Image (cartoon, helix red, strand yellow):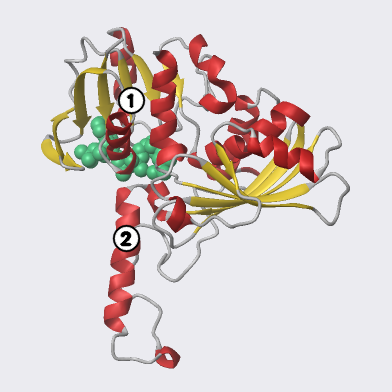
Amino acid sequence: MKKNLAVIGVGAVGVEILRILKQRKFPVGSLRVFARSQRDIEIDGQKYKVEAVDKEGFDGIDIALFAGTEGEKGASVLYANKFIEKGAVVIDNGNDFRLRKDVPLVIPEVNRQAALSHKGLIANPNCTTIQAVTALGGIHKKFGLKSFMLTSFQATSGAGKKAAESLWNETKALVEKNKNRGFDALDKILDEKPECFDEQIAFNIIPQIGGFTEEGYTSEEWKVVYESRKILDNPDIKISATCIRVPVFTSHSESIYFTPSKKVSLVELEQALNSSEGVVYLKDSLCFPLQVEGKDPVFVCRLRKALDSENSFWLWCVSDNLRKGAALNAVQIAQCLL
Ligand SMILES: NC(=O)c1ccc[n+]([C@@H]2O[C@H](COP(=O)([O-])OP(=O)(O)OC[C@H]3O[C@@H](n4cnc5c(N)ncnc54)[C@H](OP(=O)(O)O)[C@@H]3O)[C@@H](O)[C@H]2O)c1
C-alpha cells in the first residue's frame, strides 16, 4: 500500500501538505520534496531536504502533489507532464488544468468517484470554491441547487506565504509609526508602497482578487462559477460571486445565498447539513477564522431563511484555506487513489 511521493513547492500550501501527510499517517514509501532552490527546512520538528526541481530525475514516484505557483513559469506547467510520463499521478493545486475536460476536478466529499477517471492528472479546486461546494454539497445532493451567490472574505495566506507575511509587516510598520499617538491622531496609511497586494491590506479591505475579466467580474470570481458547475456536474446552476481580501492571516469566510431546486424547510436543510461529509453545522453558535485555523472541516453557521423569497436561504461558512481549501483536499484526493 505504501506510495512513493513527491511534493513540489514548499510555500504556504506545500508546507501544509507535508504536515498533513504526517498527521494523517499517509502510507509513505519514499518522499522527495522539491522547490525552485535547494535547502533544508523543518516543520513541526521534522527536517526535510528540499531539492531544486530539475528537468530530470522524476523516476519512481507514484503520486506527485504540486503546490508551486501557476502559469507558464509555474511548477505544474513546467514539470507535471514529466512526472506523468514516468508513471506518477499528479495532483495539482493550481489553476492551470482545472477546467480541462480530461482532468477531474475533485472534492472527495462531493465527487470522490471523479478522481478514479483520471488520465494522470487530477486538479484541486480553488480554495473559495472548495469551501462553498463542500458546504452546499449535501444540500445539492438531497434537494438540488437552482442558484447560489456568495461573497467571500479571503485571508491573505490565500495569496501565498509572502502575502501573509506582508500583512504582518504592514501591521508592524503602522504600529511602530503610531506608537506615540492616541486613537484620534492615528496615521493609518503606510509610508512605503505595499509589498505584496496593490493596496495596503493592514486595517483595510480590498474588493478585488485576481484580474478583472468579463462582465466586471474578477478571475477569482469566475473560478467559483465554472469550477462549482464542473464539480457538481450541473452546468445549469446560476452562480455569481464577489471575492474580497481581508486582513486575516488564515481561513476564508463566505456569506452564501442559495436557492434549492426542491421546496425545503429549514429543518430539512439542517438535517442535510448535519449529515454532510466534511461539514460541521453550528446551529446555536458562530464560527470565526481564528478558531477554525488548523482544523479540517468547513464550519457552517447562521443558516436562515431569506426575506425576499419563499425558498431561498443564507448561510455563513468558515474554513482553513490552506487545509481544506488546498493541502488537505489534495491529500484526501491522494487517499482516494489508495
Ligand atoms: N494559499 C492558498 O490558500 C491556496 C489555496 C488553493 C490553491 N492554492 C494554489 O496552490 C499553489 C501554491 O500556493 P502557495 O500559496 O503555497 O504559494 P507560495 O506560498 O507562493 O509558494 C510557492 C512554492 O512553489 C515553489 N515554486 C514556484 N514555482 C516553481 C517552479 N517553477 N518549480 C518548482 N517550484 C516552484 C516555490 O519555490 P521556492 O520556495 O523555491 O521559491 C514555493 O516553494 C498555487 O498554485 C496556488 O494558486 C493556494
Q: Kindly identify which residue carries mark 2.
A: 166
- Residue 166 percent coordinates (x, y): 32, 60
User: Residues at badges 2 and 1 in contact (C-beta under 8 Å)?
Assistant: no
Circle 1: is it few (<14), some (14-19), or many (20+) Cα within 10 Å? Answer: many
Look at the image and tell me whether residue 98 can be seen: yes
**Residue pictured at 80% horizontal, 46% vertical:** 312
Q: In which quarter of the image is the N terminus?
A: top left
Q: What residue type is labelled 2?
A: Ser
User: Looking at numbered disc 1 in the image, what kind of residue is underneath it?
Assistant: Leu
Q: In the image, 111: left or right of 198?
A: right
Does 70 appear above or below 209?
above
Give whichever of 68, 183 is nearer the camera.
183
- Inter-mark Cα distance, 2 to 1: 26 Å
Quickly name the residue at label 1: 65
Q: Hey, which quadrant is residue 26 in on the image?
A: top left
Mark 2, Cα crowd under 10 Å, few <14 / some 14-19 / many 20+, is many
